[in-house]
Amino acid sequence: MASIFSKIVSGEIPSYKVAETENCLAFLDVSPLVEGHVLVVPKKEVDYIFDLDDASFSELQLFSKKVANAIRQVITCKRIGVAVIGLEVPHAHIHLVPINHVGDINFSKSKMQPSKEQLEFVAKKIASAYLSLQ
């Protein structure tokens, strides 16, 4: 059975895309820790990030770096925190989380519930920043 991320990649489930390449996709987390929380996935469904072949792993990391730079341009923060947990969805993914304090990347805290309009606004800002970096 396809993961929720594979369904997002295929377009079966809508998402708030911020960047895309031939092999990778970045989209907003719809239940973010903070505004601008982005998920970055390889389009190929692989459960565990360290099971990706070296080329795919490198490509995902470099793509994540570009997306992080775009997030940082439009979301006020000290850093973009990076987390790879991989237990909740059986599809390799990287969390990019704008942070000002270490607690901003605490996955046990309550998640935000932004409106569709807020998500669309943030996605457009990040996508525009990403395109300007290309």
Image (cartoon, rainbow, N blue to C red):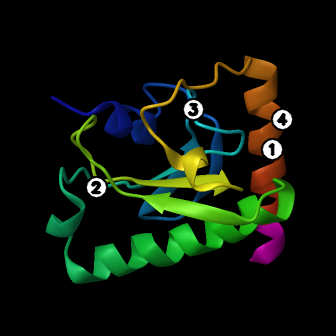
| Chain part drawn in magenta | 130-134
Q: Do the residues labelled 4 and 2 touch (CB within 8 Å)?
A: no
Mark 4: amino acid: Phe
Residue that mark 2 sits on: 44
Residue 92 falls within the magenta-colored stretch: no
Q: Tag 2: Cα neighbours inside 10 Å, few (<14), some, or many (≥20)?
A: some
The percent coordinates of residue 18 (x first, y second) are 67, 50
- At 19% from the left edge and 75% from the top edge, which residue is drawn? 53
Which quarter of the rendering shows the C terminus? bottom right
| Residue 14 vertical placement versus 92 (above, below) | above
Q: How far apart are marks 3 and 4 (CA)?
A: 13 Å
Q: Do the residues labelled 1 and 4 touch (CB within 8 Å)?
A: yes
The percent coordinates of residue 9 (x first, y second) are 43, 42
Q: Tag 3: Cα neighbours inside 10 Å, few (<14), some, or many (≥20)?
A: some
Residue that mark 4 sits on: 121
Residue that mark 3 sits on: 15
Residue that mark 1 sits on: 124
